[in-house]
Image: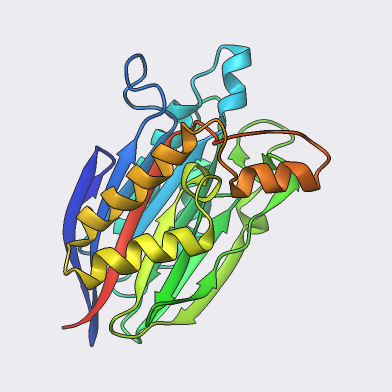
Amino acid sequence: MAADGDSDRVGIQEGNLKMMCGSFYIAKDRESRLQGDDCHFICEEMQTIGVADGVGGWSKRGVDAGVYARELINNSLLATLTQPLSQVDPMKVLDEASVKTRAAGSSTACIITLHKDNMLHAVNMGDSGFMVIRQGAAVYKSPIQQHSFNHPYQLGNCANCDKPRQAQVMKLAVEAGDVIVAGTDGLFDNLSESQILETAATGMAQGLHPEDVAWQVAERAYQISMDKKAVTPFTQSSKMAGKHYTGGKQDDITVVVSCILHT
């Protein structure tokens, strides 16, 4: 298993299919806060991945939201390891992890697992999420949960935080050749669905390992995040909300790419 870090490269085997996964993480403030507010894990033996993004607004109260996200991911990994093999229930994982996470702060979260029936099971809270690419087309993207613009649903210990039961639960069939791109809002706020599709599909067509594809996707998101004139999903959403945000959104960027293969 692997948890967080700059990159992970593991294979996840499952029934007739397996997920070959890799990840890449770019912290926004790499000079001063190497760990940032994002965290993720890849659990090979339980065919499960997860991402979390500590809500940065807590910094105004002197709280490092990354601590909550890291504790949540660690507890998610521990909860995953107690689940039946090939039958991980993402909602139970998220619920148990949330109960056991006592740090100050709050976080979005997405847990994804592959069952032996070749069905992908996922639970998503907030504006982290994933998309599924099949034969060069995006066939699914998890919906964003937010109370208002830039105010995502989030797990935490404060009175107005959301509860795991409010998370979106998803189940979908996957096929050999599918590519799953999971990430935090640093990815989805800066890259459009078509840009993620183009970058990931090109990398996979070149025969790159998912870790290298994750790096390419993350690097493209990072470059756009630093572009003060870029038109991004975040700028478009801000316009719809009556705001006037311009340019890329500088943020922590986590990308986990999983390729579905025959065993």
Q: State the image coordinates of residue 199 (x, y, percent, origin top left).
A: 36, 60
Residue at 43%, 59% in the rendered image: 196
- Vertical comparison of 34 with 259: above or below: above
Is residue 152 visible to the viewer in this orientation of the structure? no
The residue positioned 23% from the left and 61% from the top of the image is 210
Which residue is depicted at the point 49% across and 39% down? 53
Measured as percent of width and height from the top left, residue 131 is found at: 47, 66
Give the x, y percent position of residue 19: 25, 71
240 relative position to 151: left or right: right
**Residue sitting at the far right:** 242
Closer to the camera in the image, 158 or 124: 124
Whether 194 is drawn above or below 222: the answer is below
| Image spot of residue 217 (x, y percent) | 35, 52
Q: Residue at x 64, y 56 (%)?
A: 144
Q: Nearer the viewer, residue 250 or 146?
A: 250
Q: Looking at the picture, tell me which residue is in the foreground, 151 or 113.
A: 151
